[in-house]
Image (tube, grey):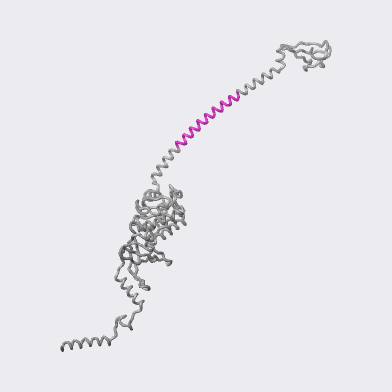
Amino acid sequence: MGAARAGGSAAGARRGRERAEPAVTPGGAPERALPVSALATAAKDALEGAFPPLWVSGEVSNFTRHRNGHWYFTLKDRLASMDCVVWSRDQRALPAAPDDGMQVVAFGQLTMWAARSRVQFAVRGMEAEGEGLWRKALERVKAALEADGLLDPARKRPIPRFPRVVGVVTSVDGAAMHDVVSVIARRNPSIDVVVIPAAVQGEAAPASLVRALEMAARWGGADVLIIGRGGGSREDLWAFNDEGVARAIAASPTPTVSAVGHEIDITIADLVADVRAATPSAAAELVTPMLNDLRRDLQALSASMGASLRRRVEAGRNDSARAAREIRGRAQRVLDRGRERLGGAASRVNALSPLAILQRGYAFPRSVGGAAMSRVAHYAPGARFELVLIDGCVDAEAVCVRPGGLR
């Protein structure tokens, strides 16, 4: 009994001290009550501290684009659902917005909106089942470019066969630049290569590529432009699927060759450019004719032109000889026809000649002075005259003159 009383007295003493001493824990007593905001902030800190960034899988539903630029949706599975948000600043890391019903895995941080004490999952990265988001982003860009005719094969321009200056839009730190420069130097050292530097991966790459293309357009000194980079992951190459980059390529006044990644990689830049090359090295070979090949072509062309010139000279000689023969033949025919016409005229003139009349048995009277006496009035009785015959003359005298016609 004494021990029990002693224990009871000790417990009572402790309770007395607890009542006498105020509690020091925040919210442990009415006078130390926490504001709601403080509790919400503490809960937010505890929640975020307890869960590191992680991947979560589920189905997207109730997707909404808010006027403030953020995306809101629910991620659910068969047993539970969770509110999710993608802040506008984090959307650049996603190829496209998800669709309702799409199975995704989302990377983010479990957090709480303190103002409403609302737990949500802040998404910073996302991948859809298969290639859903990437395919959706590509199809959206392709549709926009097709609507403006930028994928029409008819707008493709030929690459110049003999460029003097080749512009290269790529990273100065990448293997693509060194591949292009070395291939061009080996194939034709007389060609100048000008590199327009640009970032080729990461969030800043699309804007950097557009600036480089605009710089090349303002410069205008390149005969052909190569844009590209070496191989990499889908995310590494994604800048070349950007709509702004595609439109800058289409707007380039210089013919462009797209050389992005490896042979199996196809990007929007490949579809818009005038020519697609499988790799940067292949692009360099495409735009650079071999100097030795050019020399052989020039020698063959020179030989062909010489042979053609000789054939034309020989043909000209033959044509000249043939033309001379034709001219001589035509001249002879003209001369013969002239002789024939002259002979006919001579015959007609001869037929009208007095000598021809005399040959037919007629005589021609003329005065002693040689004047023709063709009328009765020229005669008088006793007048002397001559009768000209074919073989001589006869002196005659008019005995009688009888005017009047022939009887």
Residue 262 in the image, given as x and y percentages of width and height: 34, 52
Q: Nearer the viewer, residue 351 or 109?
A: 109
Residue 161 in the image, given as x and y percentages of width and height: 43, 47
* Residue depicted at x 33% and y 65%: 81
> Is residue 165 visible from the viewing direction of this image?
no
Q: Nearer the viewer, residue 318 or 124?
A: 124
Q: Is residue 12 left or right of residue 102?
A: left
Residue 384 in the image, given as x and y percentages of width and height: 81, 12
Residue 135 in the image, given as x and y percentages of width and height: 37, 56
Judge whether 106 appears above or below 37 on screen.
above
* Residue depicted at x 41% and y 42%: 297
Q: Quadrant of the N terminus?
A: bottom left
Judge whether 189 appears above or below 64 on screen.
above
Q: Which region is colored magenta?
A: 306-335
Image-quadrant location for residue 61: bottom left
Q: Quadrant of the C terminus?
A: top right
* Magenta-drawn stretch contains 299: no
Judge whether 35 appears above or below 341 on screen.
below
> Is residue 59 visible from the viewing direction of this image?
yes
What kind of secondary structure does the magenta stretch mostly adopt?
helix
